[in-house]
Amino acid sequence: MHRKRILQILKETEALLTGHFLLTSGRHSNTYIQCAKVLRFPEAAEEIVGHVCEQCINEKIDIIIGPAMGGVIVSYELGRQMKKEAVFTERVNGEMKLRRGFQIKEGANVLIAEDVITTGKSTLEVKNIVEALGGKIIGVACMINRMSGESPLDFPVYSAVELEIETYEPHNCPMCQQNSIPLEKPGSRSIK
């Protein structure tokens, strides 16, 4: 039931986009989830993140951490609902860092927060930072899980909804072959 409601929220907030998109993975897609459009409405963020909280509320969590940009508001909202400290990492010269005096204590149980997980790349970058500081990852909480197939993550993924959205290598992209829809890059991370 909540899947239908979440899809309704994504449509109402104009977060579910169709077109021709260049993803940070370098792949192309005809669908993109722009979670920032949902997160601009506190009630919508509260409702969607609430579905995630229900799944991980019984986990022993000391701190929540999300990568900037997408994980900042999600980590805050998770922290607010779970009454836990929430911090974020950010990129400095292309490298993910923990800054601003934020700390992960050795032995802390850490929940990573994301808006959308597609390849898990940002999540793994945050995991490496947390583990280098002696923290223990207990899972990742996200609004939208777009990972299809085998997950590169070795810990639980808690999501409000799982969506299978087709992606294409640029040379096999039907939108490129038709040359009818301009290619857009909606994400915030640079493509390598």
Image (cartoon, helix red, strand yellow):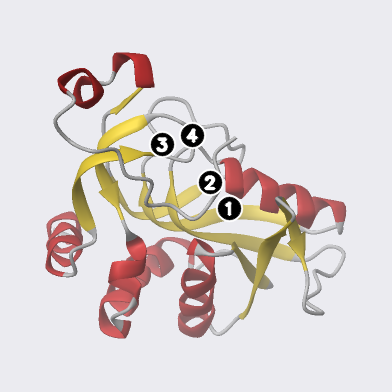
Q: Is residue 61 visible?
A: no
Image quarter in which the C terminus is found? top right
In the rendered structure, which amino acid carries the disc numbered 1?
Gly
- Could you tell me how far apart the alpha carbons at marks 4 and 1 are, in whole angstroms? 22 Å
Per the model, the C-alpha gap separating discs 2 and 3 is 13 Å
Structural crowding at the residue carrying mark 2, measured as other residues with C-alpha within 10 Å and reported as few (<14), some (14–19) or many (≥20): some
- Residue at the spot of label 3: 147
In the rendering, at what x and y percent does residue 138 appear? 63, 54
The tag earlier along the polypeptide, 4 or 3, is 4
The residue at which mark 1 appears reads as 139
Q: Secondary structure at mark 3?
A: loop
Q: Secondary structure at mark 2?
A: loop
Kind of residue sitting beneath label 2 = Pro
Residue 191, disc: none
- Quadrant showing the N terminus: bottom left
Instruction: Quadrant for residue 15, please give it.
Output: bottom left
Residue 21, quarter of picture? top left
Of the numbered discs 1 and 3, the one sitting upstream in the chain is: 1
Q: Nearer the viewer, residue 5 or 156?
A: 5
User: Which three-letter amino acid code belongs to the residue tagged 3?
Assistant: Met
Q: Mark 4 or mark 1: name the one nearer the start of the chain.
A: 4
Nearest to viewer (mark 4 / mark 1): 4
Identity of the residue drawn at 78% across and 54% down: 129
Left-right relation of 87 to 71: right
Report the amino acid beneath label 4.
Ser
What residue is disc 4 on? 25
Q: For the residues marked 4 and 3, what is the alpha-carbon distance in whole angstroms?
A: 12 Å
The numbered dot on residue 156 is 2
Image quarter of residue 64: bottom right
Q: Tell me which label, 2 or 4, sits earlier in the chain.
A: 4
